[in-house]
Amino acid sequence: MDQREQDRLTNVEISVARLDTQTAVLSNKVDTIADNHLKHLQEDVTSVKKTLWWTFSTLVGCLISLVVVLLQSFL
C-alpha cells in the first residue's frame, strides 16, 4: 500500500470516528427529548383537555338552564 492509499484510509477512519461521535450525540439528544420534553408536553396537553372539558360542561349546563327557564316562562 503506498502513502496515498494509507492517507486516504486514515481520512476514512477519521470520518467514521466523527460519524460515530455525531451519532452518539444525536442519540443522547433524542433520549433527552423523549425522557424530559415529551413528558412536559403531555402534561400541558392534559391540562388543556381538562380546561376544554370544564368549559364545555359549563356551557352545556348554561344551555340546559336557559332551556328550562324558557320552557317555564312559556308554560
Image (spheres, rainbow, N blue to C red):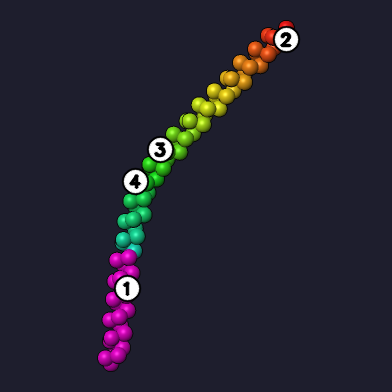
Q: Earlier in the sequence, mark 3 or mark 1?
A: 1
Q: Are marks 3 and 1 in contact (CB under 8 Å)?
A: no
Q: Amino acid at mark 2?
A: Phe
Q: Nearer the viewer, mark 2 or mark 1?
A: 2
* Quadrant placement of the C terminus: top right
Residue 74, numbered circle = 2
As for residue 48 lying within the magenta part, the answer is no
Q: In the structure shown, which secondary structural element does the residue marked by tag 3 occupy?
A: helix
Q: Amino acid at mark 4?
A: Asn
* Label located before the other in sequence (4 or 2): 4
* Gap in angstroms between the C-alphas marked 1 and 4: 30 Å
Quarter containing the N terminus: bottom left
The residue identified by callout 3 is 43
The CA distance from mark 4 to mark 2 is 58 Å
Looking at the image, residue 75 lies above or below residue 14: above
Report the predominant secondary structure element of the magenta stretch.
Answer: helix
- The residue labelled by disc 4 is 36
Q: Give 21 or 2, whichever is nearer the viewer.
A: 21
Q: Is residue 19 above or below residue 33?
A: below
Q: Position of residue 73 (x, y in %)?
A: 69, 9
The amino acid beneath tag 1 is: Val
Q: From mark 3 to mark 4, how far is it between C-alphas?
A: 11 Å
In the figure, 74 relative to 1: above or below?
A: above
In space, the residues marked 2 and 1 are separated at their CA atoms by 83 Å
Q: Which residues are magenta?
A: 1-22
Q: Would you call the spot at circle 1 few (<14 residues within 10 Å), some (14-19), or many (20 or more)?
A: few
Give the residue at mark 1: 16
Q: In the image, is residue 16 part of the stretch drawn in magenta?
A: yes
